[in-house]
Amino acid sequence: MQNKLSIYMLTSVLLLIGLAAISLYVGVYAFEKYSFTELVRGLFSNDGTITESDRFVLLGLRLPRIAMAILIGSALAVSGTCLQGMFKNPLATPDLIGITSGALMFAAITIVLGSSIKPYIPQLLHFSLLSIMSFIGALLTMIMVYRISTNKGKTNVIIMLLSGVAITAMGFAVTGFLTYISDDDQLRDLAFWNLGSLSDASWTKNAILAVIITISYFFLINKGKALNAMMLGEKDAEHLGIPVERIKKQIVLFTALMVGASVAFAGNIGFVGLIVPYILRLIFKSNYNIILPLSAVLGSVLLLSADTISRTIAPPTEVPIGILTAFMGAPIFIIILIKNKKSM
Amino acid sequence: MLEAHKISYAQRKFTILENINFSVDYGELLVIVGPNGAGKSTLLNLLANEVKHKDESVLFKNKTFEQWDEKELAHHKAKFSQSNNQDIPLLVKDVVIMGRYPYFNSTPHKEDMDAVQKAMEETDVAPLAQRNYNSLSGGEKQRVHLARVLAQLDNNVAHRLVFLDEPLNNLDVLHQHRILHTIKNFTGRGNTAIMVLHDLNLAAQFADKVLLLKNGEIVSHGIPDEVFTRETISKAYNFPCIICPNPVNQNPLIIFGT
């Protein structure tokens, strides 16, 4: 079984690499005139194989954007899978239960009200302030939703989804109100966060994301066994030597961290945490030993494809990426609802 | 093996258990019986450390559960619980493998797979290994979890302990007896089993000791011949019965409603 996992893992990583190579080529600004080897050599050696402006577009715009799609897609998919394991339901994803909205609300407040203290703090802290506030927003909503919807390890799915609706409504009200007291720049920022986009990618942001994701995966990615055992019920999982309470705290903390950072840098990108585990479950059932590590790669594949399409489908403009993920996610949401009709 | 000292338990001022004292020896098969609401499952949960309590009311191998390492503990004791109506979208074999989780990190070893296979054969679920757990009948699910518990305690630890909460629910006569023989075998090798059962005749046939509970108190505790007397049982269950020696194996045979 573990051998199979390595094969699937390898296949999906290769798929991701191929996709990244394709994504590097396509876009409003085209590089068809270079072959792939020329591009790679030009990037690394700066020997004039490619022109200075091409080099800038590649290194400063397109590559960081590809990297960010890979990082955020992976983080969102793993967050979704972990939350589904903790809530024991395939509908528990950061966006549907309101965690994204919570992070978004705190990000919006920071953008508008934080501008008064912006000039006095350095640029790096600036990024961090937004991520820290989104993280706090995500963490608070997650704790709240879990407390409201779960009793003695059993989640009431309807309450869980409705608390998501309530928090989303709250976030909508707050951001709606903020648009009336913000200036033009802030308005543009708010719109960006609400629709979600990877167009503001930079290497600094990618570095912060990479650090957060590495730390989170260190704790989360090997929790497949624990999430499987928790399907038996939390008491029975404890009899198997699984420290259930500690694991739940880790999941809450690290998914909040990853969702918070994703929202801070790319805004509201929905449904990734729903689509990826759903597809994996069709093939591997709910075996978290397999779907948790695979969702880390397939999340990247999904978001990178979506972002590449969003850049190329309607040139010269960009379709917000959230629209594309919603096109895929919403039907899956409905399918899961129909399948779960009896058990709700 | 396991000692219970003055266990009392109340939920919202409603007493469920009151002042329970007893101990279980190595190699003993203890069956807890009693009418509905006597506190049998609650007692089992307390003994198995599902309800956290700080005092030294339960000692397992002369240590409180707090003093045990949780991973280590999973090699010494296991529990079969009653609530098996969970939605588990996995293959049967993947559910049974969970019993080996305390033994491997990411990849099951050969001895883990052997233990799984052995446990599945013992509970007669080996032919179901590739089926979806959710598609099984109640009795089959029950046996899958019994296989999981057996696989968990398949190791070289001397004196292991298994808790079983009504393991025979939904099982047909053949499987009831097979499971009980398996457990009897297990305790025959110096291990201990504490089991809640409803069928008094099966208890009389297989138990080394019987603990009769009513209203959260111990009514009687001893070998089946001591506990299963006409007066004690009629009173505890509030229902008339007669007790005669079983013509086959001379155990007490309880006949209700006479």
Image (cartoon, rainbow, N blue to C red):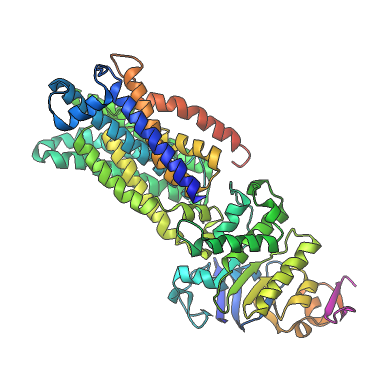
Q: Residue at x 18, y 27 (%)?
A: A42
Q: Position of residue A33 (x, y in %)?
A: 24, 16
The N terminus of chain B lies in which quarter of the figure? bottom right
- The answer to whether residue A295 is left or right of residue B225 is left
The C terminus of chain B lies in which quarter of the figure? bottom right
Task: Say whether residue A140 is visible.
Answer: no
Q: Position of residue A304 (x, y in %)?
A: 35, 30
Task: Say whether residue B130 is visible.
Answer: yes
Q: Is residue B251 magenta?
A: yes
Q: Which residues are magenta?
A: B244-258
Q: Furthest residue to the left?
A: A120
- The answer to whether residue A320 is left or right of residue B27 is left
Q: Position of residue A286 (x, y in %)?
A: 53, 45
Q: Residue at x 65, y 79 (%)?
A: B189
Q: Quadrant of residue A41?
A: top left
Q: Quadrant of residue A61?
A: top left
